[in-house]
Image (cartoon, grey):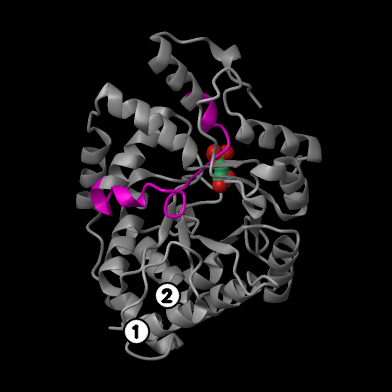
């Protein structure tokens, strides 16, 4: 096995390709992909759900809760993905990203804001010096590849990615072609991810980080989630992400656990750390903490950094801020303590 350099940054396509050849025992052809993906052990769904339920009921100390609440904020992709999004709405989102709790300057900032590609420039402008591109800490993620359905020609999808990267997106959240995946055309899905990765290349030779959305709610089985996770990593994804937030069910703990297990196995094989992003439907601080525990217990606490773990969420921050305030003062402030979008 080729020993890869442990990297928290965007993977260089060449090294991932080498790793894929090692893991597949040959080129990433339709035949080799099928043999590998269908040779994976089947997921014991009952056992997986039982493990997730067990992790979800772990209690944590109040001191750890304060840490977990702050860490949840720091791991968040604060998101707006509505057809009705406007520059004003994105500027409000960025204001919240910059200062989640205006009454408490110790409140951490989120990891990134996530928007449609045509609003990347607005987000970057509003972030100013807080943008990672200007030495700050907050990234701009753009959904692309004909999000959320992914029903467009490859040419259109790549143009979508290219526009977002040209506008300065630091991260691209692409969707896989679920139709091709479910029809068993794994090579097509693989090639598309490889092409999108290439479209993430910036003029300086670096790459926007690539998050690959599996849309697990449409994949039907845990076996498919496992296969799609492997496929996305083999093809070059820096992160694997559960959902668009537009399909129900979106993120669930068992599905996220099954993806984390693939990430753990990839790390054991290659020494490379892949990120995970549960997204969609995570609205409470209590749920977020279950995810943190699941990550820590499955791949280790070192994954609880923005380079390796994100929550994709539009309204989670509101509940987290209420809990944070309660932990600090011992009481709730009421809903007008946070801005409701
Ligand atoms: O990627 C993030 C999701 O689109 C947000 O979904 P949500 O609105 O259910 O939190």
Residue 4 visible in image: yes
User: Image quarter for residue 138?
Assistant: top right
Q: Residues within 10 Å of mark 2 (few under 14, many from 20)?
A: many
The image position of residue 181, as x and y in percent, is: 49, 71
For residue 185, side relative to residue 37 (left or right) = right
Image quarter for ligand 1: top right
Please say if the residues under marks 2 and 1 sit with CB atoms less than 8 Å apart: yes
Residue 178: within the magenta?
Answer: no
The residue positioned farthest toward the front in the image shown: 135
Q: Which residue is mark 1?
A: 24
Q: Quadrant of the C terminus?
A: top right
Name the residue located 43 percent from the left edge and 61 percent from the top edge.
8
Residue 289, above or below 14: above
How far across and down, in percent of the image, does residue 135 sit?
62, 50
Any part of residue 245 in sight: no
Alpha carbon of mark 2 to alpha carbon of mark 1: how far? Answer: 9 Å
Mark 1 residue crowding within 10 angstroms, few (<14) / some (14–19) / many (20+)? some
> Which mark is on residue 234?
2
Q: Which residues are magenta?
A: 297-319
């Amino acid at each position: 096995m080729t020993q890869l350099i442990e990297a928290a940054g965007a993977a260089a396509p060449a090294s991932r390709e080498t790793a894929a050849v090692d893991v597949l025992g040959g080129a990433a052809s339709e035949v080799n992909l099928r043999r590998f993906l269908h040779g994976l052990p089947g997921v014991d769904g009952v056992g997986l759900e039982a493990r997730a339920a067990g992790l979800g009921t772990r209690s944590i100390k109040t001191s750890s809760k304060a840490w977990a609440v702050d860490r949840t904020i720091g791991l968040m992709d604060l998101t707006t993905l509505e057809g009705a999004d406007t520059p004003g709405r994105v500027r409000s989102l960025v204001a919240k990203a910059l200062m989640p709790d205006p009454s408490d300057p110790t409140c951490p900032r989120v990891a990134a804001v996530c928007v449609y590609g045509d609003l990347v420039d607005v987000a970057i402008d509003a972030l100013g010096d807080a943008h990672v591109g200007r030495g700050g800490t907050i990234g701009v993620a753009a959904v692309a590849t004909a999000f959320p359905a992914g029903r467009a020609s490859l040419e259109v999808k790549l143009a979508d990615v290219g526009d977002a990267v040209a506008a300065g997106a630091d991260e691209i959240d692409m969707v896989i072609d679920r139709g091709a995946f479910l029809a068993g055309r794994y090579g097509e899905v693989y090639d598309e991810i490889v092409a999108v990765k290439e479209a993430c290349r910036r003029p300086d030779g670096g790459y926007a980080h690539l998050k690959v959305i599996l849309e697990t709610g449409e994949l039907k089985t845990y076996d498919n989630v496992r296969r799609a996770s492997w496929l996305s990593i083999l093809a070059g994804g820096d992160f694997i992400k559960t959902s668009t937030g537009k399909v129900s069910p979106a993120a669930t703990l068992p599905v996220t656990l099954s993806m984390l297990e693939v990430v753990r196995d990839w790390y054991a094989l290659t020494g490379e750390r892949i990120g995970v992003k549960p997204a969609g439907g995570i609205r409470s601080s209590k749920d977020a903490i279950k995810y943190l525990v699941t990550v820590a217990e499955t791949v280790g606490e070192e994954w609880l950094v923005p380079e390796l773990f994100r929550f994709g969420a539009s309204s989670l921050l509101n509940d987290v801020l209420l809990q944070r305030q309660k932990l600090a003062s011992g009481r709730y402030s009421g809903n007008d303590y946070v801005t409701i979008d």
